[in-house]
Amino acid sequence: MEVNIEKINNLPKLNSEIHDMWFSVDQIVFNESKHEFVLFFGATQELFDQYLKVKGVSTFNIKDTEKIGTYDINYLSVDLQTSTISISGCIPITITLKVSEDFVISTSSV
């Protein structure tokens, strides 16, 4: 699954794929030199056997009011006007990524 500016219509399908999947804040990886953000996720709170990768990321911020570590994904949104991608949890958490115009969002198995 891949989402970018040309494939923005794939966003609902991507959200169906990641909705209610679990992730750990401790397993987020940001490679600043490659401009890549990776969030490992899975169907259970113990096994994160898939990942969401975003290429073209300059910065990211996590708003984590609950501080519990493991969360389930509610949805991912893309705002082309502000060049941001937001990942929101069912348990309150928001991860905001600042991205370039040539961003690519993809998912895969580990």
Image: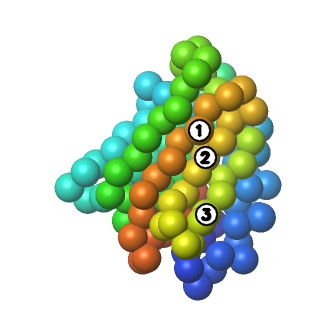
Q: Dots 1 and 2: beta carbons under 8 Å?
A: yes
Give the answer, above or below, for where 84 lies relative to 8.
above
Q: Residue at x 40, y 46 (%)?
A: 60
**Res 2 → quadrant:** bottom right
Q: Earlier in the sequence, mark 2 or mark 3?
A: 3
Is tag 1's residue or tag 2's residue first in the polypeptide sequence? 2
Q: Secondary structure at mark 3?
A: strand
Q: Which mark is residue 94?
A: 1
Residue sitting nearer the eye, 36 or 81:
81
The circle on residue 78 is 3
**Frontmost residue, 44 versus 8:** 8
Q: Residue furthest bottom?
A: 6
Q: CA distance from mark 2 to mark 3?
A: 9 Å
Q: Residue at x 79, y 55 (%)?
A: 16
Secondary element under disc 2, as helix, strand or loop, is strand
Mark drawn on residue 87: 2
